[in-house]
Image: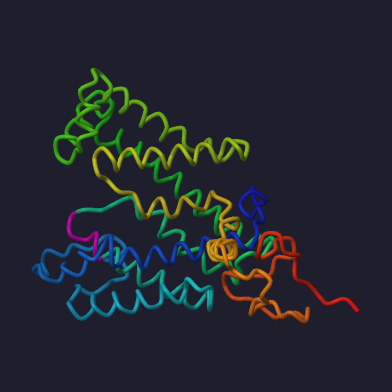
Amino acid sequence: MSRWLTEAVPRGRVAAFRTLVYLFVAADLVIFTPWVRARVDVPGDLYQPLFVGRVLPLPTPTATLVGVIFWVLLLLALLAATGRAPRLLGWTVFALYLEWMIIAMSYGKVDHDRFALLVALAVLPTAGRARHGDPTRSEAGGWALRVTQIAVICTYFLATLAKFRFGGLDWATGSVLAKAIIRRGTELADLIAQVPHLLLVAQFGILAFELLSPVIFVLPERWRHAMVGFLYSFHLVTMATITISFAPHLAAMTSFLHLERVRPVVAARRLLARRPGNDTGRASPSVPDDGTDAGPGTLDDARQPDVPLVEGEPVPGPATP
């Protein structure tokens, strides 16, 4: 079990996941949850903090408190996405985002799609430093990704237990999806609803895949990636039919993917190098034409001896005599 929990992964994967998660936190503040800032406009006695908010305890939100959290969290999340000071910035971002979520969810509605993202923010600081493109394997990074994966799957499995707890088998045989379509359905959902018994079959199917979701950890890698693709497609259909977004959950679910293979900055450089009229023979600022080592690269330009920066060019290395 210890070997499974700490299965080493490339540091480049941890670095890519860290950048993605912190950039999502910044996007979440301005795109998905800017409405949290409006919470201060309601009377303070409507603030009923979650259990963790009562245990700490945390103050009743005010305009000043929420404004400070918003701007400080936005700035620190962007800084943390660069990979610098991973522990200091990581713990600070986690604490501030946790408070942001407590404020958001203490007025009567709790979204379970935030669970895995919060776990990811809690464990990423323990992974230490990680550089984009670094193939060195890290057990600490593997543990951070594994714990996030467990949180992702618990979101599905525990959701089924909640369905049985509050709805029993009536959840599967009732009109849950039909009510959702009536409340917030799209034209695509209206077409699906016309197929006899399809919604009931879908409800049984949702219960089945949520209950069986833990099997992802025993599947071969190829089938594991196929199941992750199915989960993404499920949420895509959910968004397209009843407009329910699980964006934070989907960001955390990238912990299953080989993110170190995705190098957008390098890909952009290769694309620019292939443009007609581009002088591919011109020396790059990061690769001196005298053959000497250019020193450490930038965040998105870590040295990878086996991958040339421009297709067709030799891999830069030490000058020969």
Q: Residue at x 47, y 71 (%)?
A: 81
- Residue 225 position within the rendered picture, expressed as x and y whole percent measured from the top left: 55, 41
Farthest front residue in view? 277
For the C terminus, the image quarter is: bottom right
Farthest right residue in view? 321
298 or 256, nearer to the observer: 298
Q: Residue at x 59, y 61 (%)?
A: 274
- Residue 76 position within the rendered picture, expressed as x and y whole percent measured from the top left: 40, 77
In the image, 188: left or right of 266?
Answer: left
**Span shown in magenta:** 103-108
Is residue 3 shown above or below 291? above
Q: Quarter-wise, where is residue 290 in the image?
A: bottom right
- Residue 213 visible: yes
In the image, 30: left or right of 179?
Answer: right
Q: Quarter-wise, where is residue 220 in the image?
A: top right
Residue 231 lies within the magenta run: no
276 or 170, nearer to the observer: 276
Q: Quarter-wise, where is residue 239 in the image?
A: top left
Is residue 284 shown above or below 312? below
Q: Residue at x 42, y 32 (%)?
A: 209
63 or 256, nearer to the observer: 256
- Residue 60 position within the rendered picture, expressed as x and y whole percent measured from the top left: 19, 73
